[in-house]
Image (cartoon, grey):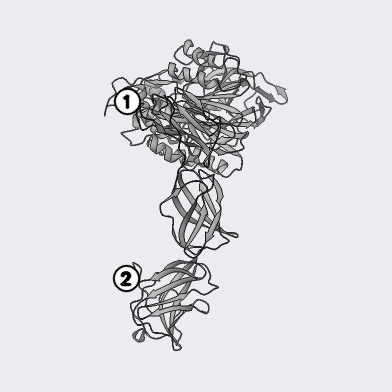
Amino acid sequence: MKKLITLLTGLLFVALSVGLTGCDDSDEQVNRPDERFVSGVVIPTALDVCEGLEMTIEGQGFLQGDAVTLRGDSDMPAQTTGITPSSISFVLPDGLEDQTAYKFLLVRNGELQALGASRLTLKLAVNIDLGGTITGSWNEEASIRGNGFTASDELILTQGGGKFSASVTQADNQSLRFRIPQTAVDGDCEFTLRRGDKEQTLGTAKLSLSLDNTIPDQTGASIKGMVHYGGKGIENVLVSDGDRITATDANGYYWLASDKRNGLAFVIQPSGYEVPTDKAIPQFWHPCTGSASTVERIDFQLQPVSNDDFTLLVATDMHLANRNTPKDYTQFADGFVKELTDTYNSTSSKVYCLNLGDFAWDQYWYVNKWAIPECKKAVESFNFPFWSVMGNHDNDPYGTSDFAAETPYREELGPVYYSMNIGKVHFLMLDNTVYLNNGGGPGVIGDRSYKKYFTQQQLDWIREDLKYVDKSTPIVVGFHCPVYTYGWNGTSLTTNISMDSSAAVSDLLGCFDGYASVNVVTGHTHVNRNMQSPAFANVYEHNVAAVCGTWWWTQQFGKNNVCTDGSPAGYKVFTVSGTDLKWQFKATGLPAERQFMTYDMNSVKEYWATNTVVQKAIELGKDFAGRGNDYSGVGENEVFVNVWGHEPGKWNISVTENGKSLDVRQVWRRDPLHTISYDAPRCVANGGEMTFPSGYTPHMFAVTASSASSTLEIRVTDRFGNTYTETMKRPKTFSTDLNE
């Protein structure tokens, strides 16, 4: 028998008198209201119940010998367990149906009185009390109060997108006891009860887990702690404060002689393990709370995982700021977030995301009340780790120094540079924006200026980190501002330095001398560029297009989301198998097989010459001055092919017309889609002024057809042998719709 519910007089529910709520009370056996046996009864219109539940109805006038029957399609007598003048207790009968309205009838000497009616929802257990916080340690017992638990029940815990079982040690009518599993971590935890093929979510509580061991002090060490899995120490795991790196001993203990300059300590995730996540954010760091002269303990938990094979999503420049039409966070949720949750949240394989910065937009932190905390909430639905680095716009615009401006980021997302291992790949996540912010101060936004280089402290730490990395290990290096950019010498691309100086480039890339493979992933530019380092043969840079496209503007004007080089807003997908890495650009909202856009330039030039918005922008001049000639040099019957993820020397583009191959040449042109989706309408809307104009595209190719109406077969093959095709029937009407 399972005690649960007392139906009290005066509950905040509607009182139900004879014949109420969906039950037919026309039966002559039911007394009229003026002949009620009892009074003052209140029955809720809906109740959660479980099998074998004991209920108590309170009122006035109950007598010994009274009983209760539930009436649905038939009468179902309940077993009476107790009667007083002011209450009757009984056990719900077996055979109740879920989501069904039942009339509660009082039976006295063969006569009936309707006490009220309620729609019953059948649960596995009811009256659940998780207590808000469950305190304990791994392998210790904890309890959940409630009614309806059985010895056959299973308990499932969900944390950080993962589910795991907890051993049930005892279950009765009042509580369920379980053993806290090694896989549990500090933080919010959802509890689910499973019984056979049925499940019930019990709710969420915070797990507060602690170790009961004592770690001795060590001379000179101001930070000490333990790296463990469920309370068991893990040897040879690296821990750092951003200046020094140390390794755990056989007990999983570590000591750091730290001056606490960065105000935190972090674990370097080792191969074969993951750090816990809290709403997608990896929990690999903890703040320091004491001075450099104070010894404090900081523990780190790891969870074993098989992740030699994994998918890596590289995304950048989200620029969430509570602005634009539609709002940027709405476009973000409906596009990027929905695509990733739909595609990867339920997959059984391992998935990780790298956010390469400009998560927020410093200019709007205060005026729009949207900064790093709000950005975090926008990705908390991800069931995979979301690792981050800083962008220039992730700094506090009130900051008076680079370090001060980074403080909000450190508080929310951890150190501004760190490393981790995923499977057999070593990752270095760095910061190459040095925030100057001239004129900034408390309550005053500065000029938000910055430099692009790596500080000496960071470079020293990188070299120290690499001492622990074998030269054969593949390395992925992530930071915000790119190392290189493309230029044009009139006939072909040139690779130029994008950071502040060649010395800044050498300072970083020289650290990787002797390493077999170094893939650098960057953002900042809102374009797609793939560049082999001209000075370091082992370094290849992927400068990835922006999630926000052109700062979320083109949806308003062109009903699309396009970057300044004509690439759709998107991200890069790396497929990793052991030490083998493959990659592919993924346009948000388009199939992975879609890798290029074709333009029939006859149609584009006609649109350009006749469209009223374009002509108005040309007339206004100002920021659009000289742009009327954008496509004047394009010949008749030319076709442009913008191959978004093109890699010079690694991809092949072929175009045939009536079986004959056409000469494919690279051109240095602005992309028509972006120019018409954004440049012209934005200029018109702003009286001739514009920010973020179209740039010259380093992955635009052209062919010249023999006529305006021929059909072209376009075939693009990437470096990994994947082939993408289009049969282009001409004339092809120009459209700003990426799906056409």
**Of residues 311 and 615, the one drawn nearer to the viewer in this rendering:** 311
In the displayed orientation, state which residue is furthest to the left. 443
Identify the element where label 2 is drawn.
loop
From the top left corner, tell me how far across and down residue 182 is, in percent: 54, 45
From the top left corner, tell me how far across and down residue 737 is, in percent: 52, 35
Image vertical order of residue 243 relative to residue 116, above or below: above
For the question of whether residue 621 can be seen, the reply is no
Identify the residue shown where x is 35% and y is 87%.
35
Q: In which quarter of the image is residue 726?
A: top right
**Of residues 123 and 312, the one drawn nearer to the viewer in this rendering:** 123
**Of residues 163 and 180, the one drawn nearer to the viewer in this rendering:** 180
Pointers 2 and 1 in contact (C-beta within 8 Å): no
Read off the residue under disc 2: 10
From the top left corner, tell me how far across and down residue 183 is, in percent: 54, 44
Give the amino acid type for the residue marked by disc 1 in the picture.
Gly
Disc 1 residue crowd, few under 14, some 14–19, many 20+, Cα 10 Å: many
**Of residues 62 and 707, the one drawn nearer to the viewer in this rendering:** 62
For the question of whether residue 122 can be seen, the reply is yes
Cα distance, mark 2 to mark 1? 57 Å
Image vertical order of residue 415 relative to residue 182, above or below: above
In the displayed orientation, state which residue is furthest to the bottom. 109
The numbered mark, 2 or 1, whose residue comes first in the sequence reads 2
Read off the residue under disc 1: 399
Quadrant the C terminus occupies: top right
Identify the element where label 1 is drawn.
loop
Image vertical order of residue 15 relative to residue 549, above or below: below
Disc 2 residue crowd, few under 14, some 14–19, many 20+, Cα 10 Å: some
Q: In this view, does 649 lie to the left or right of 116?
A: right
Give the amino acid type for the residue marked by disc 2 in the picture.
Gly
